[in-house]
Amino acid sequence: MYVPGNHDQELTAPAIHSAPIGFEDPIPGPQGCDNADGRVITAAGLTLAGLGGSIRYREGPNQYSQGQMRRRALALELRVRLRRRRVDVFLAHSPPRGVGDGEDPAHRGFAAFHRVIERLAPRLFVHGHLHPYGRRHEDRQVGSTRVVNAVPYRLVEL
């Protein structure tokens, strides 16, 4: 499972065209992985939900204003509630605002993620985007949710 980040290409599926069978464009994104952006996915007995992207700091794909991410988060919350599922893991590219994010314009987190954590109460909130450059970011706790920066990688047991 993955969510796109601010350095990833636009991941919308290509338009259907008349290419011969066997010559279709590949599905965008990492092959063999499922894009959890804006979706609720069940895998290995866990329910995952995700929202990719970072705060808009320049032109490019997968960047959002605080208001745009608030609307995306509300839509995802509705999808979760309609499925009547409890989210075990929430995947995001960026952290919640004020929870291990940066103060520079490119690394600020999203305020909307606080409502996600409060309303969906995932056991684990995994994000990237902030690169610790040789030092490990400490895990944080928001209510009952453990917030983990997965850069460069993390092995987490639930």
Image (tube, grey):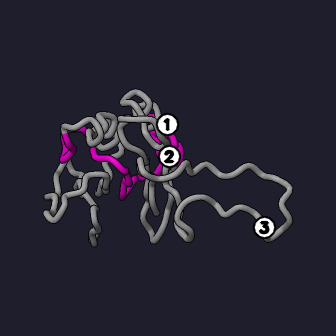
Residue at the spot of label 1: 75
Q: Left or right of 158: which side holds 61?
A: right
Q: Left or right of 143: which side holds 127?
A: right
Residue 117 covered by magenta stretch: no
Q: Of callouts 2 and 3, which one flags the residue occurring earlier in the amino acid sequence?
A: 3
Residue at x 52%, y 48% (from the top left corner): 83
The residue under label 1 is which amino acid type? Ala
Residue 81 covered by magenta stretch: yes
Residue extending farthest front: 59
**Whole-percent x and y of residue 93?**
36, 51
Q: Nearer the viewer, residue 126 or 5?
A: 5
Where disc 1 sits, the SS reads helix
Q: Are marks 2 and 3 in contact (CB under 8 Å)?
A: no
The residue under label 3 is which amino acid type? Phe
Q: Where residue 89 is drawn, which disc sits there?
A: none
Residue at x 38%, y 54% (from the top left corner): 91
Near mark 1 (Cα within 10 A), the count class, few <14, some 14-19 or many ≥20, is some
Q: CA distance from mark 2 to mark 1?
A: 8 Å
Q: Where residue 38 is drawn, which disc sits there?
A: 2
Q: CA distance from mark 1 to mark 3?
A: 35 Å
Magenta part of the protein: which range? 73-102
Q: Where residue 23 is drawn, which disc sits there?
A: 3
Which of the 4 quarters of the picture holds residue 154? bottom left
Q: Of callouts 1 and 3, which one flags the residue occurring earlier in the amino acid sequence?
A: 3
Q: Nearer the viewer, mark 2 or mark 3?
A: 3
Q: Nearer the viewer, mark 2 or mark 1?
A: 2
**Whole-percent x and y of residue 97?**
24, 38
Q: Are marks 2 and 1 in contact (CB under 8 Å)?
A: yes
The residue under label 2 is which amino acid type? Gly
Residue extending farthest top: 67
Where disc 2 sits, the SS reads loop
